[in-house]
Image (tube, rainbow, N blue to C red):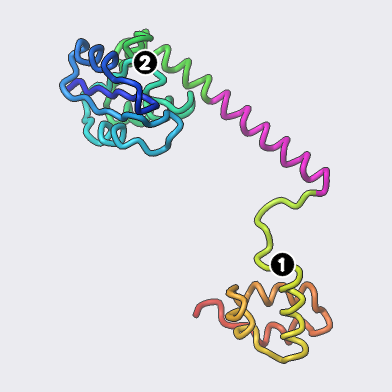
Protein backbone atom coordinates (compact mmCIF):
# COMPACT_ATOMS: atom_id res chain seq x y z
CA UNK A 1 0.00 0.00 0.00
CA UNK A 2 1.13 3.53 -0.77
CA UNK A 3 0.60 5.86 2.19
CA UNK A 4 1.16 9.60 1.87
CA UNK A 5 2.11 12.20 4.44
CA UNK A 6 1.59 15.95 3.98
CA UNK A 7 2.45 18.86 6.28
CA UNK A 8 2.34 22.64 6.33
CA UNK A 9 3.88 24.76 9.08
CA UNK A 10 1.24 27.48 9.52
CA UNK A 11 -2.54 27.44 9.63
CA UNK A 12 -2.85 29.87 6.69
CA UNK A 13 -0.92 27.57 4.33
CA UNK A 14 -2.70 25.03 2.16
CA UNK A 15 -2.07 21.33 1.62
CA UNK A 16 -3.59 21.27 -1.88
CA UNK A 17 -0.29 21.10 -3.80
CA UNK A 18 0.99 18.22 -1.70
CA UNK A 19 -2.32 16.35 -1.70
CA UNK A 20 -2.58 16.60 -5.47
CA UNK A 21 0.94 15.23 -5.89
CA UNK A 22 0.35 12.39 -3.41
CA UNK A 23 -2.93 11.42 -5.06
CA UNK A 24 -1.25 11.46 -8.47
CA UNK A 25 1.43 9.13 -7.06
CA UNK A 26 -1.32 6.62 -6.21
CA UNK A 27 -1.53 7.05 -2.43
CA UNK A 28 -4.43 5.08 -1.00
CA UNK A 29 -4.23 6.80 2.39
CA UNK A 30 -2.93 10.27 3.20
CA UNK A 31 -2.17 11.53 6.70
CA UNK A 32 -1.85 15.25 7.34
CA UNK A 33 -0.42 17.73 9.84
CA UNK A 34 -1.79 21.24 9.33
CA UNK A 35 -0.16 24.22 11.03
CA UNK A 36 2.58 22.15 12.68
CA UNK A 37 6.22 23.16 12.31
CA UNK A 38 8.73 20.59 11.14
CA UNK A 39 10.78 21.14 14.30
CA UNK A 40 7.95 19.81 16.47
CA UNK A 41 8.72 16.44 18.02
CA UNK A 42 5.04 15.47 18.25
CA UNK A 43 3.20 15.41 14.94
CA UNK A 44 -0.11 13.52 15.21
CA UNK A 45 -0.51 12.95 11.49
CA UNK A 46 3.01 11.56 11.10
CA UNK A 47 2.57 9.33 14.15
CA UNK A 48 -0.65 7.92 12.68
CA UNK A 49 1.02 7.29 9.33
CA UNK A 50 3.95 5.46 10.91
CA UNK A 51 1.61 3.30 13.01
CA UNK A 52 -0.44 2.42 9.89
CA UNK A 53 2.54 1.38 7.76
CA UNK A 54 3.16 -2.36 7.38
CA UNK A 55 5.81 -4.50 5.72
CA UNK A 56 5.67 -4.00 1.98
CA UNK A 57 4.11 -0.51 2.23
CA UNK A 58 5.70 2.72 0.97
CA UNK A 59 5.62 6.07 2.75
CA UNK A 60 5.42 8.90 0.22
CA UNK A 61 6.03 12.61 0.79
CA UNK A 62 5.98 15.55 -1.60
CA UNK A 63 9.38 16.78 -0.44
CA UNK A 64 12.00 15.59 2.07
CA UNK A 65 11.54 18.52 4.45
CA UNK A 66 7.88 17.51 4.94
CA UNK A 67 9.10 14.47 6.89
CA UNK A 68 12.31 15.32 8.75
CA UNK A 69 13.07 17.98 11.35
CA UNK A 70 16.73 17.65 10.40
CA UNK A 71 18.94 15.38 8.34
CA UNK A 72 19.58 13.23 11.40
CA UNK A 73 15.86 12.94 12.17
CA UNK A 74 15.09 12.17 8.53
CA UNK A 75 17.67 9.38 8.34
CA UNK A 76 16.60 7.91 11.70
CA UNK A 77 12.94 7.85 10.66
CA UNK A 78 13.59 6.21 7.28
CA UNK A 79 16.03 3.72 8.82
CA UNK A 80 13.42 2.60 11.37
CA UNK A 81 10.85 2.21 8.60
CA UNK A 82 13.17 0.14 6.41
CA UNK A 83 13.91 -2.18 9.33
CA UNK A 84 10.15 -2.84 9.36
CA UNK A 85 10.19 -3.56 5.64
CA UNK A 86 8.71 -0.19 4.67
CA UNK A 87 10.14 1.78 1.73
CA UNK A 88 10.26 5.56 1.33
CA UNK A 89 9.62 7.82 -1.66
CA UNK A 90 10.13 11.58 -1.93
CA UNK A 91 8.49 12.89 -5.09
CA UNK A 92 10.32 16.20 -5.56
CA UNK A 93 13.80 14.74 -5.10
CA UNK A 94 12.93 11.43 -6.84
CA UNK A 95 14.40 9.47 -3.95
CA UNK A 96 12.97 5.95 -3.80
CA UNK A 97 14.60 3.52 -1.41
CA UNK A 98 12.98 0.64 -3.30
CA UNK A 99 15.46 1.01 -6.18
CA UNK A 100 19.25 0.96 -6.21
CA UNK A 101 19.72 4.66 -7.07
CA UNK A 102 17.41 5.82 -4.27
CA UNK A 103 19.04 3.41 -1.83
CA UNK A 104 22.47 4.82 -2.75
CA UNK A 105 21.31 8.40 -2.15
CA UNK A 106 19.84 7.40 1.20
CA UNK A 107 23.15 5.83 2.26
CA UNK A 108 24.90 9.08 1.34
CA UNK A 109 22.40 10.94 3.53
CA UNK A 110 23.09 8.48 6.35
CA UNK A 111 26.84 9.13 6.04
CA UNK A 112 26.23 12.90 6.16
CA UNK A 113 23.99 12.49 9.21
CA UNK A 114 26.72 10.52 10.96
CA UNK A 115 29.20 13.26 10.10
CA UNK A 116 26.79 15.84 11.56
CA UNK A 117 26.49 13.78 14.76
CA UNK A 118 30.27 13.78 15.03
CA UNK A 119 30.43 17.56 14.64
CA UNK A 120 27.78 18.04 17.32
CA UNK A 121 29.70 15.74 19.68
CA UNK A 122 32.96 17.59 19.03
CA UNK A 123 31.32 20.98 19.64
CA UNK A 124 29.79 19.73 22.89
CA UNK A 125 33.13 18.37 24.10
CA UNK A 126 34.87 21.63 23.17
CA UNK A 127 32.20 23.65 25.02
CA UNK A 128 32.58 21.53 28.16
CA UNK A 129 36.38 21.83 28.05
CA UNK A 130 36.15 25.61 27.65
CA UNK A 131 33.71 25.91 30.56
CA UNK A 132 35.96 23.83 32.81
CA UNK A 133 38.96 25.93 31.81
CA UNK A 134 37.02 29.01 32.98
CA UNK A 135 36.24 27.34 36.28
CA UNK A 136 32.54 27.02 35.59
CA UNK A 137 30.60 24.39 37.50
CA UNK A 138 29.16 21.65 35.27
CA UNK A 139 26.38 19.21 35.95
CA UNK A 140 23.31 19.40 38.12
CA UNK A 141 22.97 22.33 40.50
CA UNK A 142 23.00 21.64 44.24
CA UNK A 143 19.61 20.85 45.75
CA UNK A 144 20.06 23.43 48.49
CA UNK A 145 21.33 27.00 48.41
CA UNK A 146 24.05 28.38 50.74
CA UNK A 147 21.59 29.94 53.20
CA UNK A 148 19.60 26.73 53.58
CA UNK A 149 22.76 24.71 53.99
CA UNK A 150 23.84 26.98 56.83
CA UNK A 151 20.43 26.51 58.46
CA UNK A 152 20.78 22.74 58.17
CA UNK A 153 24.17 22.81 59.85
CA UNK A 154 22.76 24.85 62.75
CA UNK A 155 19.68 22.61 63.03
CA UNK A 156 21.85 19.51 63.23
CA UNK A 157 24.63 20.79 65.47
CA UNK A 158 22.76 23.22 67.75
CA UNK A 159 19.18 21.91 67.80
CA UNK A 160 20.18 18.24 67.66
CA UNK A 161 17.54 17.49 65.04
CA UNK A 162 17.77 14.19 63.19
CA UNK A 163 18.67 13.93 59.52
CA UNK A 164 15.22 12.54 58.77
CA UNK A 165 13.54 15.52 60.43
CA UNK A 166 15.78 18.03 58.66
CA UNK A 167 15.34 16.33 55.27
CA UNK A 168 11.56 16.28 55.69
CA UNK A 169 11.52 19.97 56.62
CA UNK A 170 13.53 21.04 53.56
CA UNK A 171 11.94 18.51 51.17
CA UNK A 172 15.16 16.72 50.25
CA UNK A 173 16.43 13.20 50.73
CA UNK A 174 18.25 12.41 54.01
CA UNK A 175 21.32 11.36 52.00
CA UNK A 176 21.54 14.92 50.63
CA UNK A 177 21.71 16.26 54.18
CA UNK A 178 24.19 13.57 55.22
CA UNK A 179 26.55 14.27 52.32
CA UNK A 180 26.49 17.99 53.05
CA UNK A 181 27.27 17.52 56.74
CA UNK A 182 30.09 15.09 56.06
CA UNK A 183 31.63 17.57 53.64
CA UNK A 184 31.00 20.85 55.48
CA UNK A 185 30.76 19.92 59.15
CA UNK A 186 33.77 17.68 59.81
CA UNK A 187 33.71 18.62 63.48
CA UNK A 188 30.58 16.55 63.95
CA UNK A 189 32.35 13.41 62.83
CA UNK A 190 31.41 11.17 59.96
CA UNK A 191 30.41 8.34 62.26
CA UNK A 192 27.99 10.59 64.13
CA UNK A 193 26.38 11.74 60.90
CA UNK A 194 26.11 8.20 59.59
CA UNK A 195 24.49 7.06 62.82
CA UNK A 196 21.54 9.37 62.16
CA UNK A 197 21.05 8.39 58.52
CA UNK A 198 17.95 6.59 57.41
CA UNK A 199 18.28 3.19 55.69
CA UNK A 200 18.86 3.25 51.93
CA UNK A 201 15.41 1.76 51.31
CA UNK A 202 12.39 3.06 53.21
Q: Give the image quarter of residue 171.
A: bottom right
Q: Which residue is mark 1?
A: 145
Q: Which residue is mark 2?
A: 63
Quadrant, the N terminus = top left
Residue 151 position, x and y percent, is 74, 79
Q: Which residues are magenta?
A: 114-135
Task: Provide the major secondary structure of the magenta segment.
Answer: helix
- Left or right: 39 in relation to 192: left
Residue 6 position, x and y percent, is 30, 23
Q: Secondary structure at mark 1?
A: loop
Which callout, 1 or 2, points at the residue further toward the start of the chain? 2
Asked whether 113 or 66 is in front, the reply is: 66
Q: Give the image quarter of residue 120.
A: top right
Q: Residues within 10 Å of mark 1 (few under 14, many from 20)?
A: few
Q: Residue at x 67, y 76 (%)?
A: 177
> Up-down: is 6 above or below 160?
above
Q: Residue at x 55, y 77 (%)?
A: 200
Asked whether 28 or 44 is in front, the reply is: 44
Residue 90 position, x and y percent, is 33, 15
Q: Are marks 1 and 2 in contact (CB under 8 Å)?
A: no
- Left or right: 109 in relation to 150: left
* Membership of 120 in magenta stretch: yes
Asked whether 33 or 182 is in front, the reply is: 33
Between marks 1 and 2, how big is the CA–CA gap? 51 Å
- Left or right: 132 in relation to 11: right
Q: Residues within 10 Å of mark 2 (few under 14, many from 20)?
A: some
Q: Residue at x 79, y 84 (%)?
A: 189
* Membership of 183 in magenta stretch: no
Amino acid sequence: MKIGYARVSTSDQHLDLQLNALNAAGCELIFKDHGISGIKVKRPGLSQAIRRLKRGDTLIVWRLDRLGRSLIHLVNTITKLRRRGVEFLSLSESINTANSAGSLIFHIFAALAEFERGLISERSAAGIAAARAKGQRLGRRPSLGPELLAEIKRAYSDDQRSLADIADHYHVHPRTVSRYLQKNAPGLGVAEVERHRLPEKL
